Amino acid sequence: MEHSHHIHLLLLLLITTSLAPSQASLGNGHTIKSATFLSPKFMLGPGSVENNFFYNIDFPRGHIGLKSFDAEVVDEAGNSVPLYETYLHHWLVERYHVPREKARDPNLSGKDVTYVRNDGFCQNGINRQSNGLGSETRRTSTYVPDPYAIQVGNPAEIPDGYEEGWMLNVHAIDTRGAEDRLGCTECLCELYNTSGVARFLRNDYRGGLFCCFGHTECRVEQGFVAPRRNLYLRYTVKWVDWDIGILPVKIYIFDVTDTGKRNGGSTGFGPENGCQIEYDIEPCRAHGWCVDVKRRNFTMPSGGYIVYSVAHQHTGGIGSTLYGKDGRVICHSVPIYGTGNEPGNEDGYIVGMTTCYPKFGSVKLAAGEELILESNYTSTSERGHTGVMGLFYILVADQTPSAFPFLGAPFSIGDYLSLSSWYAVALFGLMAVAVAVAIGVGVLSFARKEGAESGYHRVMA
Ligand SMILES: *[C@@H]1O[C@H](CO)[C@@H](O)[C@H](O)[C@H]1NC(C)=O
Ligand SMILES: *[C@@H]1O[C@H](CO)[C@@H](O)[C@H](O)[C@H]1NC(C)=O
Ligand SMILES: *[C@@H]1O[C@H](CO)[C@@H](O)[C@H](O)[C@H]1NC(C)=O
Ligand SMILES: *[C@@H]1O[C@H](CO)[C@@H](O)[C@H](O)[C@H]1NC(C)=O
């Protein structure tokens, strides 16, 4: 290791002296910036629900690469609020373009903006999402590993006269004093003052988003009182300024309830349409414990290399796997259940999801490859679940990083053919130097050893 450090230094020295203009583009020098913001406030009392859509939220501006987005609910004093008091059903961030003169209008709404779609499937909110999580947000890693990032604010993609903005949707349920906490978090219609509304939708609709929308109320124990209070979503964004050394990733979000025709044929949101987002788990017929397995196939519109993946499940979830062709496991992501009292470890709640960070280049998806998403839940004879989800979020890159020791993956000349020619020439020069030095001091064996460590690094953040 000591040995290789010297080699890195030597290489850097050579790069600095011979190729000054490109040194900052080579992946090593990206300063990661970080900023923490508070959402506009929302107010909750026992049993109440808010589902707010905040436009033009505070967000880093300019042409940048997003590295992570972490969030939690806090109170007025900045204290973390536990899930058994305020259940964070979900938060989502969605990027949009808006005419410049409207961008700061405090009354901005969805009809004024054009959402930027991700590369995923459903023709509803899911294909606008840049990021989003639920109760698991405190302990789920969202970090996009170097040299990758989610490219935003690219001036070339923003129409003339428009600017980019961000919408934050926060759906939170106050379960202090709830008669049935789990029922409230699962939006069981019989507990909310909306069951009549839901029956218009579908006779057998027992629970889900249509029963716990904003300004509804979940039943609270008689006589329970607690003050209404102001809450905020506190979010921390990490990013890098964009440059040619950063590799962009595509976002795909799969929904196990997606019954639409492939590629994005599903037409709407709601129980009767393609992407239902949520589904129910029936109580177990037998005594004891059942496993519900739900599967759905997806055909990838284009190929690439997986950089990061994570599933989203609700209480009762026991894991989700995305399989590729021939049943190979692309990522297995499982819920982490809390076991204590403190925020981030609330007993019985999903407080995190495990994530997959495959070694660069090791998990390749072919264009047209059929993937299978599997989402497993348990139920008991006493109780099923309503309004559960089976989403899977993957980041896919077109290329893998180069094989310079300080970038750490196999080099492919093809990766660089699309760069401007001076840059390609510079790289070839650099490569020749690197190879010469490497052979001389035995870096190749070091690199081979690194390369042999294949498979997944599953990270529990
Ligand atoms: C926003 O809406 C409020 C209430 O409808 C209205 O009073 C206000 O004038 C609007 N503001 C702008 C900038 O349009
Ligand atoms: C549910 O109750 C709350 C609080 O009383 C009320 O503000 C809300 O309008 C009710 N919602 C429906 C759909 O009846
Ligand atoms: C889904 O993929 C599996 C494995 O490739 C295949 O056996 C199955 O028939 C596919 N199902 C559908 C509905 O296409
Ligand atoms: C889901 O359950 C089935 C049946 O028990 C099992 O074969 C499969 O591996 C499980 N998948 C996940 C993602 O846990």
Image: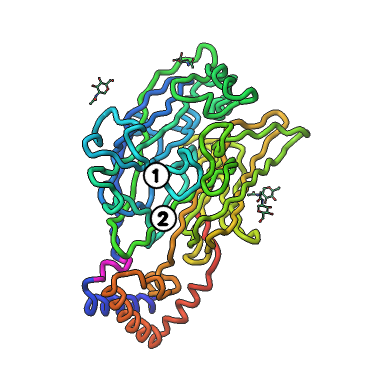
Q: Secondary structure at mark 2?
A: loop
* Front position in the image: 264 or 377: 264
For the point 54% across and 62% down, the residue is 366
Query: What residue does disc 2 label?
Result: 144
C-beta proximity under 8 Å, tags 2 and 1: no
Q: Is residue 256 left or right of residue 395?
A: right
Disc count in the image? 2
- Please identify the quarter of the rendering in which residue 335 is found: top right
Number of the label disc, if any, that sits on residue 150: none
- Please identify the quarter of the rendering in which residue 148 is found: bottom left
Q: Is residue 110 left or right of residue 171?
A: left
* Front position in the image: 292 or 253: 253
Can you give x and y, in whole percent of width and height, for residue 225 in the image?
Answer: 46, 15
Can you give x and y, in whole percent of width and height, for residue 24 in the image?
Answer: 26, 67
Reply yes or no: does residue 35 show up in magenta.
no
- Sequence-wise, the earlier of marks 2 and 1 is 1
Residue 210 vertical placement versus 276 (above, below): above
Number of the label disc, if any, that sits on residue 70: 1
- Please identify the quarter of the rendering in which residue 29 is found: bottom left
Can you give x and y, in whole percent of width and height, for residue 81 in the image?
Answer: 42, 32
Residue 220 vertical placement versus 278 (above, below): above
Q: Residues within 10 Å of mark 2 (few under 14, many from 20)?
A: many
Specify whether residue 157 is in view. yes
**Quadrant of the rendering where the N terminus is positioned:** bottom left
Q: Which residues are drawn in magenta?
A: 22-28
Can you give x and y, in whole percent of width and height, for residue 197 in the image?
Answer: 54, 19
Farthest top residue in view: 223
For badge 1, the amino acid type reads Asp
Specify whether residue 348 is in view. no
Q: Is residue 62 left or right of residue 351?
A: left
Q: Secondary structure at mark 1?
A: strand
For the point 39% across and 19% down, the residue is 228
